[in-house]
Image (cartoon, rainbow, N blue to C red):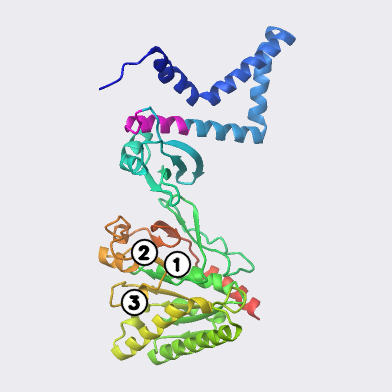
Amino acid sequence: MRARLTVGSAVLLWVVRPSWLWRRELAALVVLVLAAAAGWLARGWVGAVAVPVEVVLIVVVVPWSRRRAAVVWRRARLRRRWDRACRYAGLTTVNDRIPRIRRERRVPAGDRLVVRVPRGATVDDLAGEAERVAAVLKVREVRVGRDVDRAEVAHVDVVRRDPFAGAGALRWPWALAARGSVADPVPLCVDDMGEPVAVRLPGKHFVIGGEPESGKSAALSLLLAAAALDPSAQIWGWDAKVVELGLWRPVMTRFADHDMDAAIAQQEDLIAEMNRRYEVLEAAGRRALHPGEAPLILAAIDEMRFFTANIDGRAAKHFNALGEDVAARGRAALIVQAAATQKPAGAVVPTGWRDLMALRWAMRCTTRDASDTILGAGMATAGFDASEIDIATRGVGWLYAEGGFPRRVRSYYLDDSDIRSIVARGAALRA
């Protein structure tokens, strides 16, 4: 049943509402009309034409006003298209209200919006019609997420393009930095909206998994680079192939290769250092060290499978027990684990150890189960499946860090010359 429109409601729906959506343009037209009137009073018909033209030229020529006018016009156009998309998608309430844009921000892949749903509607209603809204907007995708604090607020990503498509290697923002600090958020990647993503290392452990040539070692090298540029940080490395972490040897405090006895001994030494730090905390009557009070230790493990699923089962079991102990107790002692593995199966990344890793990065995997091994059970079913990543896109994966859900990201990249330059600077800082 439809209510019969009165004269007042018809004027509201077909005159007032469209005029309100064009209010910025109408305001600009009123300004030009007033300028023409002022010019006509001053110089007649010549002034009536010249003054509005002068106003337009000033707006166009002055950089600040030109940028501001472009932003206002783009926002007004976005809001009109959003209004039309919501109405075509049937998101109007009984009193003709739709989800309204409260804030918008342009990003490389499109727009990020903060939207407030009207009374009588929910964020789930908007999420359920996201595909229809995207079709009306003529964009790649519309993603809707509920605000964690307010049920009536939605965070909407309007995806217009894929920032990863056709893009070359992404240069690390700290690649030329003279010095860094692991206490600061470390830039690791850009998300699928083209915005940079940084994570804080103290208190968090990191696991990176994926098939060969998916970009695991490149992602791990970013953590090593951040620690190398901080002269107060220590790097303890385990690398069965030697060559992946070999370039970082000049800035490493300790290093172990494919010798399982040496790898286990190094883990035991790390636990001894951890216990010593806890003795200091106990004597001081404190529970945790803070960045800057002691060197942060980055325990980097490449080719994790060699150590955790070694042919020597007894040695592997011992190594796993030591590594899990470091992951369980290292946080308050400023010890951070970062592990990379090719085959992220349950036998390679022990469940008890993996569950202590707060930061998880799943590069391309061969199966959904392998993806869930890194991100957690059920993530592939929820849509976060690393097995669906294009095999040709190295460095692309799902990063499960701060926030409620994993994000599709692409890592920055350091080539060998970048690594040598960073290592040289790190060695000079330590000297």
- Residue at position x 29%, y 87% in the image: 311
- Residue at position x 56%, y 35% in the image: 71
Image coords of residue 258 (percent x, y): 39, 86
Image coords of residue 185 (percent x, y): 55, 63
Residue 395 seen in this snapshot? no
Query: Pointer 2: what residue?
Result: 363
The secondary structure that dominates the magenta segment is helix
SS under mark 1: helix
Query: Pointer 3: what residue?
Result: 352
Query: Pointer 1: what residue?
Result: 219
Report if residue 79 lies within the magenta region: yes
- Which residues lie in the magenta part? 78-94
Marks 2, 3: nearer the viewer? 3
Q: Earlier in the sequence, mark 3 or mark 1?
A: 1
Q: Nearer the viewer, residue 1 or 396?
A: 1
Q: Quadrant of residue 176?
A: bottom right
Report if residue 84 lies within the magenta region: yes
SS under mark 2: strand
CA separation in Å, label 1 and label 2 = 10 Å
Q: Amino acid at mark 3?
A: Gly
- Residue at position x 30%, y 59% in the image: 385
Circle 1 residues within 10 Å: few <14, some 14–19, many ≥20: many
Q: Amino acid at mark 1?
A: Ala
Q: Earlier in the sequence, mark 1 or mark 2?
A: 1
Circle 2 residues within 10 Å: few <14, some 14–19, many ≥20: many
Residue 413 seen in this snapshot? yes
Circles 1 and 2, Cβ within 8 Å, touching? The answer is yes
Q: Earlier in the sequence, mark 2 or mark 3?
A: 3
Marks 3, 1: nearer the viewer? 3
Q: Nearer the viewer, residue 167 or 52?
A: 52
